[in-house]
Amino acid sequence: MTDEGVRSTGWFAGVERDDVEAGASRIREGRADAPNDWPRLAVEAGFADDEDDYYAALHDAAVRAAREAAAERERADDQQLVHAVRAMDDLTERANELAERVAEWAGSRYPDAGTGVDYARELAERDPESPTDERLVSLARRTANLADEADQLRSFVERETPEVAPNLAAMAGPTLAARLVSLAGGLDSLAKKPSGTVQVLGAEDALFAHLRGRAPSPKHGVIFTHEYVRGTRPEKRGSAARTLAGKLAIAARIDYYSGERKPELDEELRERIERIRAKGEAVDDGATANGGGDEE
């Protein structure tokens, strides 16, 4: 514990037996330099009637401390990003599903029926001419509202992610950065993951299939959406994904432990990707000169 009295007596020093909140605070904030016979000291100090009473008080205080810590963790900025990006994905998925239903229904009534969320937005502006049209247009409006809410959440994510993880957001883009944080369960969890795990986040199904011997090892997960991976020739995407994942892992650690912006990381990544792409182009040019080469 932090003061001499607590070190000599225990976490319960100066705490009333029934004051669970104070006990929880002491447990969360204190420390012991060395082990001791805490139950005996608690009884001798008059804090507890006996050893069972001491452990009952310790249990109550520890549970309260754990709940407070969990509540604080849930309110943390990175957890708000997790909720936002998951809600955004849920809304986008539901809007797309309903847009298909709207298009199918509209196709049975209008010769000019279209498809997708954009058509649902267009149909939502139409004045219904019958009870059936009224229900169809109402469904289109709800679909458009879901898509609009998803767009607003995307704007929130793009605005907030650079505040929570500046290096990760700059390197991956705000939406992908938030999605990586979400998949990891939080910025702290992402910061503790090795680059190989970061590389395949979002590819869990493919990874499990590989572990069961049913598929090759995945080269990338959601980071495939990054231009550095998606825009690299297929035979070099594995190298690009490893390089990107390595830098993203470093960025996440810096964001979590210091929060200091490191622009040089972006430049290092860009130069490395350029070398990977140039090497792939050189190999392809050499193969073509010899009458071979990979076909796209």
Image (cartoon, helix red, strand yellow):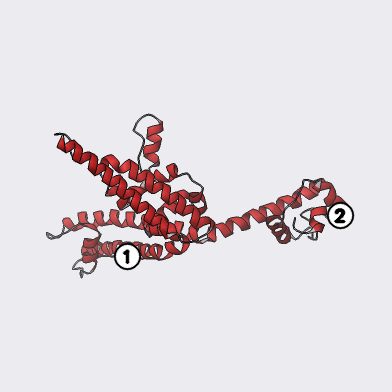
Q: Quick one: which residue is furthest to the right in this view?
A: 44
Label 2 element class: loop
Which residue sits at x=29%, y=61%? 143
Pick the residue in front: 8 or 285: 285
Q: Residue 121 at x, y = what percent? A: 24, 65
Q: Earlier in the sequence, mark 1 or mark 2?
A: 2
Quadrant where the N terminus sits is bottom right
Which residue sits at x=34%, y=52%? 271
Residue 293 visible? The answer is: no
Q: Which mark is residue 148?
A: 1
Q: Quick one: which residue is furthest to the left in this view?
A: 111
Which residue sits at x=56%, y=57%? 73
Local packing at callout 1 (Cα closer than 10 Å; few below 14, some 14-19, many 20+) is some
Local packing at callout 2 (Cα closer than 10 Å; few below 14, some 14-19, many 20+) is some
Q: Residue 36 at x, y = what percent? A: 80, 46
Count the marks.
2
